[in-house]
Amino acid sequence: MKHNVILGTGSAAPDNVVTNADLEKIMDTSDEWIVQRTGIKSRHIARPGEKFSDFAVPAARQALDMAGVEAADLDLILAGTISPDHIMPSGACSVQALLGAHKATGMDVCAACSGFIYGLSIADKYLKCDPDMNILVIGGEIVSHHLDWEDRTTAVLFGDAVGAAVVGARADGHRLLSVETGSDGNLGRLLYIEGLGSATPVTKDFDIDNTYIKMKGREIFKHAIKNMVEVSNRALARAGVTLDQVTKVIPHQANMRIIEMLAKQFKKPMSEVFVNIDRYGNSSAGTIPVALSEAVDTKFIEPGDIVLMTVFGGGLTWAAAVLEW
């Protein structure tokens, strides 16, 4: 009997690493202030001219190699991102062309930080309709292009990175047991980018400030904890898995305080919770697939583990997935 499984994972990030000490030189902040409030010590930041596909393609190729799937055999590419190379064509279509995945359909999933798990949800449903498909799910951002580097409340938090996974239906493999998603557009103004959409079009008087991320951090913290716990419980229930059976947790890497609070809510020691926020910051849709790829590469997750992944992002959106590794 075939199950929907993750066949391979991969990740990539700019080689330009910006430390807290670097940020001290350009804004009113300090390493102590950033680490104490966020847990972040450094982040990868794209250099001028670097774009989403520059990192999505190597992440995808790494995942394809691990999966033993050729790009030419992909049927669908889903790119969870709010920072594709262009508004049109989509990020997925840009990646399709560069990979040579000539028969694949490409589409973007715009769910901010939740984009990768939203993509897994779509892939899961496609595979239930057509188990012969090979699907590439990408999540990641060049979010630094949307940061005001004079605003320490946002600029210190984010980084650039992209992760990917190949998903298919097989008799054996790392089973995708369940995926659950949610959103509340009524809370959209807690985390948003004003400009570049049809409500705030680019004109000769366009204000560059409208391209920057705006966030109400305290309110986001409250909604993030509540909704990640709720959607995780739904995903576990659908999978027929209890929290006691979960052996590893891969949470959204937005803030160390949120990660620690989730660990307490799930009654898990930090040794069972994957953390790389100290090195990446919040790469939005990249946090979950990059963390998953690193967890696989470092053997943080091993055969037999029950893995819970959970995320929260702008929209507001949230999602969770349960894997049997």
Image (cartoon, rainbow, N blue to C red):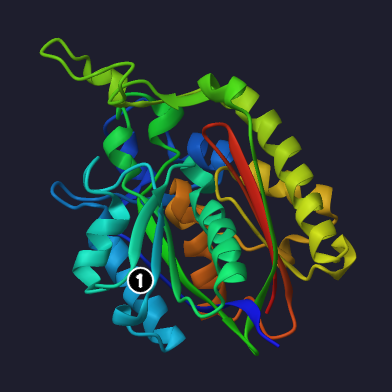
Residue 184 horizontal side relative to residue 93, left or right? right
Relative vertical location of residue 73 with respect to residue 161 in this rendering, above or below: below
Q: Could you tell me which residue is drawn at 38 percent across and 80 percent down?
A: 64
Considering depth in this image, is 48 or 176 the residue closer to the camera? 176
Q: Using the rendered image of the protein, determine whether residue 300 is visible from the camera's viewpoint.
A: yes
Mark 1 crowdedness (10 Å alpha carbons): few <14, some 14-19, many ≥20:
many
Q: Could you tell me which residue is drawn at 78 percent across and 43 percent down?
A: 230
**Quarter of the image holding residue 300?**
bottom right
Query: Residue 267: x, y in percent?
Result: 85, 55
Query: Residue 116: x, y in percent?
Result: 50, 55
Residue 234 horizontal side relative to residue 141, left or right? right
Q: Of helix, strand and loop, which one carries label 1?
A: helix
**Quarter of the image holding residue 298?**
bottom right
Residue, disc 1: 60
Considering depth in this image, is 44 or 3 the residue closer to the camera? 3
Q: Could you tell me which residue is drawn at 60 percent across and 22 percent down?
A: 187
The quadrant of the picture occupied by the C terminus is bottom right
Q: Using the rendered image of the protein, determine whether residue 216 is visible from the camera's viewpoint.
A: no
Residue 272 horizontal side relative to residue 205, left or right? right
Q: At label 1, which amino acid type do we have?
A: Ala
Query: Residue 259: x, y in percent?
Result: 67, 48
Relative vertical location of residue 16 with respect to residue 247 in this rendering, above or below: above
Outermost residue to the front: 129
The quadrant of the picture occupied by the N terminus is bottom right
Outermost residue to the left: 204
Q: Could you tell me which residue is drawn at 48 percent across and 76 percent down?
A: 133
